[in-house]
Image (spheres, grey):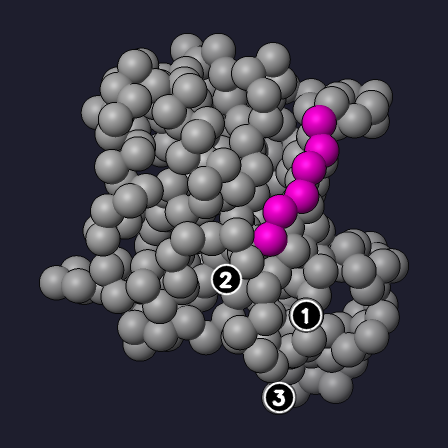
Amino acid sequence: MTGVRRVRLVGENGIVRTGVVDGDVVRLEQADSNSTVAIIDPETLDVAEPWQLLAPVDPPEVWAAGVTYKRSRDARIEESEAKDVYSLVYDAERPELFLKDAGGRRTVGPGQPIGVRGDATWSVPEPELALVLGNRVPVAVTIGNDVSSRDIEGANPLYLPQAKIYAGACALGPAVLAPEDWSQPFEIELRISDGHGKTLWEAETSTARMKRSFDELIEFLVRDNPVPAGSVLMTGTGLVPPDDVTLLPGHTVAIRVPGIGTLVNPVRRAEELL
């Protein structure tokens, strides 16, 4: 996927900078600086010290969509005691939408820890393409991780906020991409590894498998709803680990979308992130 990639970085002086990725360097955009920052890997966007990547956007709100892929619908039917709910949502005109975060209290950037609830038994990453919204239209994309407690949601759909909204339950990064061609699908790859780097589960999907379009999700999101510009909408996941794979402290989640980069986050207990 081609387009302009932008990142946010912080250096030793604590000043946050923004820049455009140009090959293996970042060209800082501030008018008072023509300096560049070397990137170790232009694919993953790992940066050389002393720089550190931040979440590429600081959204006032983060929203999420659910049951937008058939695999997600099937998984949530399997886990839920209210099985008809998810079939109805998948086939309905109105999508599932929910507020994931506001004010950045639960959202982290690349390299920062994501959280798992202490009262959950099945915690999973949900790798998603995330839309950065302008005035009711998408202006860029990034990678999103809608970390979720599947067992809590499966017990009762009314527990959705507890399953989705807690410390470290959302990650964004490592860059925002303004695509040259919005019609092209995005490939999404997921890898979960343990504390020794051993792969526990990996899979891939594509936004071409989504039932709903980006425009459709945005139209419902902003309908009678004052969503501020700069907000992010995660578009749902098509990758659900089996029920014998659960995130634990010490694990690492890596989500790769070609053209954007790789979002890598270690896993910690959510209570440690408060």
Q: Is residue 219 visible?
A: yes
Q: Is residue 205 magenta?
A: yes
In magenta, the rendered stretch is: 201-206
Lower position in the chain sequence, tag 3 or tag 1: 1
Image quadrant in which you'd find residue 139: bottom left
Give the secondary structure at mark 2.
Answer: loop
Q: Looking at the picture, which amino acid does disc 3 mark? A: Ala
Q: Residue at x 25, y 58 (%)?
A: 221
Give the secondary structure at mark 1.
Answer: loop
Measure how far apart labels 3 and 1 are at the Cα level. 28 Å
Q: Residue at x 40, y 64 (%)?
A: 214
* In this view, 15 is above or below 63: below
Q: Which mark is residue 57?
A: 2
* In this view, 89 is above or below 128: above
Query: In the rendering, at what x and y percent does residue 199 appear?
Result: 79, 26
Image quadrant in which you'd find residue 153: top left
Q: Quadrant of the N terminus?
A: bottom right
Q: Residue at x 41, y 18 (%)?
A: 79
What crowding class fits label 2: few (fewer than 14 Cα within 10 Å), some (14-19), or many (20 or more)? many
Query: In the rendering, at what x and y percent does residue 15 appear?
Result: 61, 64
Q: Looking at the picture, which amino acid does disc 2 mark? A: Val
Query: In the rendering, at what x and y percent does residue 177 appear?
Result: 60, 70
Point out the frontmost of discs 3 and 1: 1
Tags 1 and 2 in contact by the CB under 8 Å rule? Answer: no
Is residue 75 found left or right of 54 in the rendered image? left
Q: Looking at the picture, which amino acid does disc 1 mark? A: Met
The residue wearing badge 1 is 1
The residue wearing badge 3 is 31
Is residue 52 found left or right of 59 in the rendered image? right
